[in-house]
Structures are given as C-alpha cells and as structure tokens.
Amino acid sequence: MQSRAMSFVEAVTNVVVGFGLAVLTQVLVFPVFEIAVTFDQHVSIAAIFTLVSLARGYVLRRFFNQQCS
C-alpha cells in the first residue's frame, strides 16, 4: 500500500509532467493549425487546462468514492 507521502509525490509528479506535456503539445500542434501565441501564452493556456483537469479529477474521485461507500 502506498503511503500518504508517496501518494502526494505521485500526484505532484503527475501534474508537473502533464503540464510540461501540455505546453510541449501546444508548441508543436498550434502552428499546424496556424494558431500564433507567445510562449507565455502557451504556459497560461496549459495552466488553465491543468487547473480544470485537477478539478475534474477531484470531483470524479469524490463522486466514485461516494458511490462505493
């Protein structure tokens, strides 16, 4: 069983890696669709989607935990 500390480390790692992948994906994909944004805008967009993803994950986890109890 995973300790609380390691669960926290896993969650933070997941968010950091996801954020980096989001920025990298945008940098590579946006030009294909002729979307021109600055690097700072890429970071801002990725941050917004990361926050939405965190909220989604939390709400779904709480929902399924409630259903299983």
Image: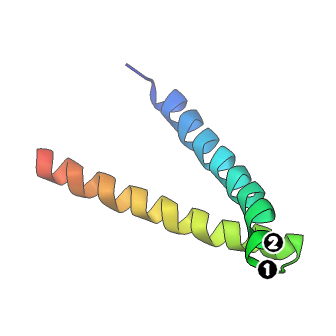
> Where on the picture, by quarter, is residue 22?
bottom right
Question: Which residue is located at x 39 percent, y 57 percent?
Answer: 58
**Marking on residue 31:** 2
Q: Is residue 31 visible?
A: yes
67 relative position to 39: left or right = left
Q: How many marks?
A: 2
Q: Is residue 69 visible?
A: no
Please report contact status of discs 2 and 1: CB closer than 8 Å, yes or no: yes
Q: CA distance from mark 2 to mark 1?
A: 5 Å
Q: Nearer the viewer, residue 20 or 57?
A: 20
**Marking on residue 34:** 1
Instruction: State which quarter of the image contains the N terminus.
Output: top left
- Which kind of residue does numbered mark 2 sit on? Pro
Q: Tell me which colouring the rendered structure shows.
A: rainbow
Question: Which residue is located at x 87 percent, y 70 percent?
Answer: 39
> Where on the picture, by quarter, is residue 48?
bottom right
Question: Which residue is located at x 55 percent, y 35 percent?
Answer: 10
Q: Percent position (x, y) of residue 13? A: 63, 39
Name the secondary structure under disc 1. Answer: loop
26 relative position to 59: left or right = right
